[in-house]
Image (cartoon, helix red, strand yellow):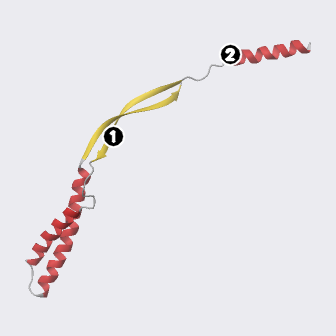
Amino acid sequence: MRIQHCLGTALILVAASVSATPAIAKVVCRDVQVVHKVPHKDQHRVAGTAIGAVAGGLLGHQVGGGKGKTLATVGGAVAGGVVGNKVQKAHQDSQTYTTTERRCDEVQD
């Protein structure tokens, strides 16, 4: 009787393991558009700062006389440098290119 009980339990376990099918994994792929910034040699925007400073200094030099002229020149150079830096940054940030990349994920069915 004990052997029959063990055999019956064993058959039930075998039948349960045979009928349970493992989950099948499949790979799902899709194309994704990726936007990249164009790399620049002048990352610190020295050219924009320098050009802006010179232009601002020249404009500031046209204003006032004596010590006021010197102050206007320095102020114009500083303001022009800041503006030139911001203009170059905006220009560099707007330069991008797009690539298509294939992304794949494994999903359980």
The spot of residue 83 in percent (x, y) is 20, 66
In this view, which residue lies farthest toward the front?
41
Residue drawn at the location 31% of the way across and 43% of the way down: 35
Hey, which quadrant is residue 50 in on the image?
bottom left
In the image, taking residue 95 as reference, residue 70 lies left or right, namely left
Residue drawn at the location 19% of the way across and 62% of the way down: 47
Mark 1: give few (<14), some (14-19) or many (20+) Cα within 10 Å. Answer: few
Q: Are marks 1 and 2 in contact (CB under 8 Å)?
A: no
Mark 2: give few (<14), some (14-19) or many (20+) Cα within 10 Å. Answer: few
The residue singled out by tag 1 in the image is 34
Hey, which quadrant is residue 34 in on the image?
top left
The residue singled out by tag 2 in the image is 18
In this view, which residue lies farthest toward the right?
1
In the image, taking residue 68 as reference, residue 4 lies left or right, namely right
Residue drawn at the location 76% of the way across and 18% of the way down: 13
Q: State whether residue 4 is above or below residue 65.
A: above
Kindly identify which numbered label has been placed on residue 52.
none
Question: Which badge, 1 or 2, comes first in the chain's sequence?
Answer: 2
The spot of residue 51 in percent (x, y) is 15, 65
What is the C-alpha distance between the residues marked 1 and 2?
46 Å
- Type of the residue with mark 1: Val
Q: Secondary structure at mark 1?
A: strand
Q: Secondary structure at mark 2?
A: helix
Judging depth in this view, the residue of 99 and 59 nearest the camera is 99
Q: Quadrant of the N terminus?
A: top right
In the image, taking residue 65 as reference, residue 9 lies left or right, namely right
The spot of residue 30 in percent (x, y) is 39, 30
- Type of the residue with mark 2: Val
